[in-house]
Image (cartoon, grey):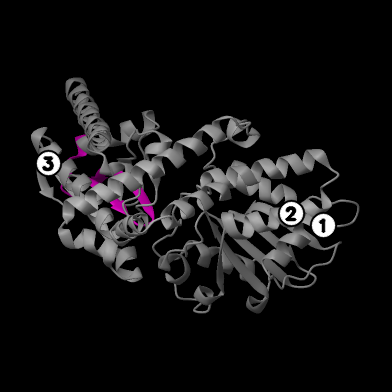
Amino acid sequence: MINEKTNRLRNFLEKLDVIRKKYEDIEAQKDQFNVFSAMFDTSDEVYLHSQFIYSLLSFKTGNEYYYLNTFLKTLDSKFQYKQDSLEIHKELHDIDILLIDKTTKNAVIVENKIYASDSNHTDEGQLEKYYRIVIEDEKIPETNIEVFYLSLDGHEPSPESVSTCKKYPQLCEKVQCISYPNEIKSWLQGCMQFVYNKPFQRETILQYIKLIDDMTNNVDIEERIEIKKLIGESKSNLESAKLLIDNVNHLHWHTIADFWNGLADALEKQGYEVTQRPMDENFTEIVHGSNRKQKNAALVIGIKAAHPFIIRIEEYNDEWFYFGVEKDKKTSKQYVQAFKELVTNDSCYEDDENWHIWRYPSVNENEKFNSWDIHVDATFKLIDDNYRQHITSIIIDDIDRFIKDVERLVAKDSTQS
């Protein structure tokens, strides 16, 4: 029975592969040039996405803010403004986009997230800070402030962002989550009615919509229809498709477990002592847990070798995979100094209030996986043994290089002393 199911599934996947290749060929024949991806890093929140949205919102045709009005209508915003007192800001008080009218006493905060996590502090969350500034510095009543949290998938801000200081208990309920493929794309499509005879504006907006589709993996409708037809053309295909759907979570569990356990094993073979590794329950929380458990889950590997400090390898729901050395009183001054020198002289490394030094692995942009989301291409590709080993090798090479750089600086310091 298992062999029969396997054969049927293999046959279904072969037919699905024909459709995939067909639409890859169609896509390859299209005009692939996009001015945005040609000039910017497509994940650049500030200089690409916030700048473009701000430019449209602040653009006037005659005395009309057509883009702004369509934006507010798309979001069902209650923001009221007057032409002569409206202010549209980018990066004022570090707020990505701020609409404010001090005459009508109204404001709209738009926080834009592509891949970055919330910039929270121990005593105040990011959105709490912006909300407080608009109330205290800009003198806008709480009841007249709207907060929109923009992301690729419409996810919520971190709990810390809205409830660290607990000064504004209503803020959590006020935040409205919006996304690029839904609200932003709908807004831009709604703008087409007044730019149909303005070719520069029209083509620029169309290129940005295409960028959104590429970033959110929004495939052509024709491809979806053909896949649906393939699934429905036979009972066998229907059962094979359902078998895949039913097992997505199980595939997810085993994929991230294989990667993290394989990384820990590979580090041991490299000579490192693994002091901590993820448990099965961590993978279960990420894949099968409640929303709260998924957000609070963490994947951690701790390693040490001849060096007198622990390297932690971590990934959280709102922070991409990284490794480094946490601050503690046991780390000797010579190593702390070496960490500082690396951070100062090598842009790969960073530090903060909790870490002497940390960095992301040197993988390509399209290789950045997310253990929480099997639908991310780079995560799904971890199913492939060769690809998984490729990513593991990059991470271990980065760690090896980090150790050598630190030991070189310590030895240099000892010689000079």
Q: Which residue is mark 2?
A: 57
Q: Residue at x 16, y 59 (%)?
A: 280
Can you give x and y, in whole percent of width and height, for residue 318 in the image? Answer: 39, 56
Question: Furthest-right residue in view?
Answer: 62
Q: Quadrant of the N terminus?
A: bottom left
Give the quarter of the image for residue 101.
Answer: bottom right
The percent position of residue 82, horizontal first and vertical second, equals: 84, 66
Indicate left or right for 133 with 85 as reference.
left
Distance from the alpha carbon under mark 1 to that under mark 2 = 7 Å
Residue 203 magenta-highlighted: no
Q: Which label belongs to residue 65? A: 1
Q: Which residue is mark 3?
A: 265
Q: Amino acid at mark 1?
A: Tyr
Magenta stretch, residue numbers: 312-334
CA–CA distance between discs 1 and 3? 59 Å
Whether residue 327 is visible here, answered yes or no, is: no
Give 290 or 226, whichever is nearer the viewer: 226
Q: Identify the residue at horizontal 21%, vertical 24% (top origin).
A: 408
Whole-percent x and y of residue 194? Answer: 83, 52
Q: Nearer the viewer, mark 3 or mark 2?
A: 3
The residue closer to the viewer here, 196 or 238, is: 238
- Around disc 1, counting alpha carbons within 10 Å, would you say few (fewer than 14), some (14 to 19), or many (20 or more)? some
**Amino acid type indicated by mark 2:** Leu
